[in-house]
Amino acid sequence: MGGPRRVANDPLRKQRILDATLAVIAEHGVHRTTHRRIADTAGVPLGSLTYHFESLDAILEQAFEALADSMSERYSTALTEAPDQLAACAAVTDLICGDDYVTSREVTILHEMYGYANHNPAVAEACRRWLLRSRDSLAVHFPPRACRAIDALIEGWPMHQAWEREPLERDLVHATIVAIAERIR
Amino acid sequence: MGGPRRVANDPLRKQRILDATLAVIAEHGVHRTTHRRIADTAGVPLGSLTYHFESLDAILEQAFEALADSMSERYSTALTEAPDQLAACAAVTDLICGDDYVTSREVTILHEMYGYANHNPAVAEACRRWLLRSRDSLAVHFPPRACRAIDALIEGWPMHQAWEREPLERDLVHATIVAIAERIR
DNA sequence: TCTAAGTGCGTACAAACGTACGCACTTTGT
DNA sequence: ACAAAGTGCGTACGTTTGTACGCACTTAGA
């Protein structure tokens, strides 16, 4: 008896394709992301993509969703580990400044994700989920209005920094977060 | 005598093509921006694009540069008109909240521009120029370190807002700007 | 009015694209 | 050992793409 289920030969293949998709996006951009480039990068045959995914858009959607999940998990971990508000300020500073939590490669892909999300409802929804989850993580340590302001900074500062030549000043970022935490209620 | 110069029939055509390019980007995204779609939107024949522009990338570059120029001019105007720092805070609040200076359509195109800039040096340079000019505009009213923090907010808040369902609270934005202006030296 | 030079575009083409589909292969139940 | 069913992919097809190019048209000087 048992259902008609058979065992897949390579259960990790789907994930490998999604990883390769993010790599292609980071290197070439969404506008030059194709089935063939993803297949080459992942080291799988072209037909494997159309077998596992309904369309190219479906691949991009799932790849972006995986990225957003992975990033919001790191955000959540960094913030829930902080014992008090001051430590939370330091954690947020790390999130903004460091390459530890969010690499510059990920900022690049995020730019692409936001652009793509404006033309794809599923990815737009993923952006919204990510935004809400990051705000929830902040809400443990900051009042609701401060969360919004800090969230905007977390969004804007690394993005801005992408075009800057000089490295980001940690002290400045930290002072700004503290100022918002103390003044915005 | 006289140079071999003749008069062009339609000197505005180049600009019209660039306008149409931004319209196509806003509606379909860079990844679905093609010669033919631009030509249809602009109401010009396909050959006209390859005549006026070297390549599709060249069209995108010039379109994005035109947008950045137009936006940094509006930023500059709004800020230099402010008589003092408090008025400048209000002006920045307007820039962030209002659809008056930067429309949501432009935020959409900005997302696309940032994504594209990661894979195109000319557009990356345009982003950098825009960043520096907007910081110069702020420098009239705020100390240098405050400029960076405020700049990050100008960047991040509208971007964040793009995924939010509720409208942006003007009071909160204004209070945040004032807090930064007073506390960051 | 005629000529030469430069403008502007219709059309064509090779390359690259997304996707469908038939077929070999593997596994399970008998 | 055999049949049935599901897995996975090589290949091919029709479409769309960016771009080149020949040719009609317009204009300025003589």
Image (spheres, coloured by chain):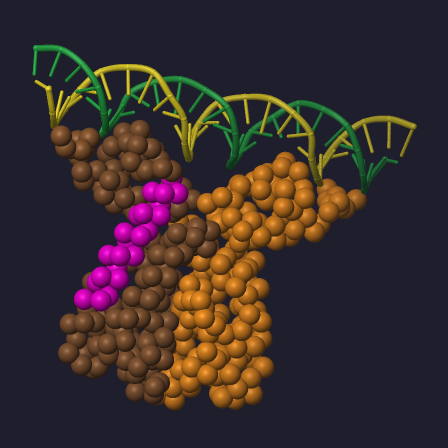
Chain colours: A orange, B brown, C green, D yellow
Residue B99 drawn above or below residue D4: below
Q: Is residue B70 magenta?
A: yes
Q: Nearer the viewer, residue A56 or A9?
A: A56
Give x and y (percent) for residue B39: 29, 34
Q: Which residues are magenta?
A: B56-77
User: Where is residue B16 shown, x and y percent of the image?
Assistant: 22, 41
* One can see residue B166 in this view: no
From the image, give the main secondary structure of the stretch colored magenta: helix
Percent coordinates x, y for residue B5 in the rendering: 18, 33
Q: Left of B3 or right of it: where is B120?
A: right
Q: Quadrant of residue A47?
A: top right
Taking B50 as reference, is C14 left or right? right
The N terminus of chain A appears in which quarter of the rendering? top right
Q: Left or right? Give the position of B48 relative to B112.
A: left
When the figure is inspected, residue B4 is found, relative to residue B153, above or below; the finding is above
Nearest the eye: A135 or B3: B3
